[in-house]
Image (tube, rainbow, N blue to C red):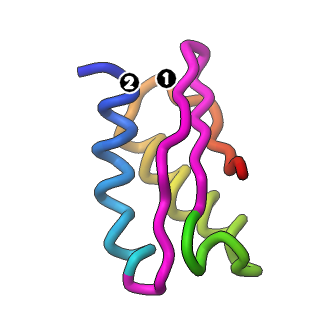
């Protein structure tokens, strides 16, 4: 399974929690050097806690499940 597929699977694990608050996350890109770019959608996009959600939920789950991920960033 490719790194991109593994990241997508990890996002499927966090998606229900985001959707329960009216938000969502979309995978934009996974680079060879382990940088994952995601797009926060819905209520997550303008939420004042978006950075905390990105770091404490999305990035944590991705790093736990996908070897080689170095960084997770949100893009517009």
For the residue carrying disc 1, how many other residues have a C-alpha within 10 Å: few (<14), some (14-19), or many (20+)? Answer: few
Q: CA distance from mark 2 to mark 1?
A: 8 Å
Q: Which mark is residue 3?
A: 2
Numbered circle sitting on residue 37: none
Q: Position of residue 65 (x, y in %)?
A: 35, 40
Q: Residue at x 28, y 44 (%)?
A: 9
Residue lying farthest to the bottom in this orientation: 21
Point out the frontmost of discs 2 and 1.
2
Instruction: Please report contact status of discs 2 and 1: CB closer than 8 Å, yes or no.
Output: yes
Circle 1 is placed at which residue position?
A: 68
Q: Secondary structure at mark 2?
A: helix
Task: State yes or no: residue 39 in magenta.
Answer: yes
**x, y percent for residue 1:** 23, 21
Instruction: Give the vertical position of 35 relative to 33 (above or below).
Output: below
Horizontally, is 11 left or right of 38 in the view?
left
Image side of residue 1 versus residue 43, left or right? left
- The residue furthest left is 1
């Amino acid at each position: 399974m490719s790194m991109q597929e593994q990241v997508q699977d990890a996002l499927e694990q966090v998606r229900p929690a985001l959707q329960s608050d009216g938000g969502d996350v979309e995978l934009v890109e996974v680079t060879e050097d382990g940088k994952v770019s995601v797009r926060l959608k819905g209520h997550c996009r303008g939420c004042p806690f978006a950075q905390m959600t990105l770091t404490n939920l999305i990035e944590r789950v991705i790093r736990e499940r996908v070897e080689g991920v170095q960084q997770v960033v949100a893009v517009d």
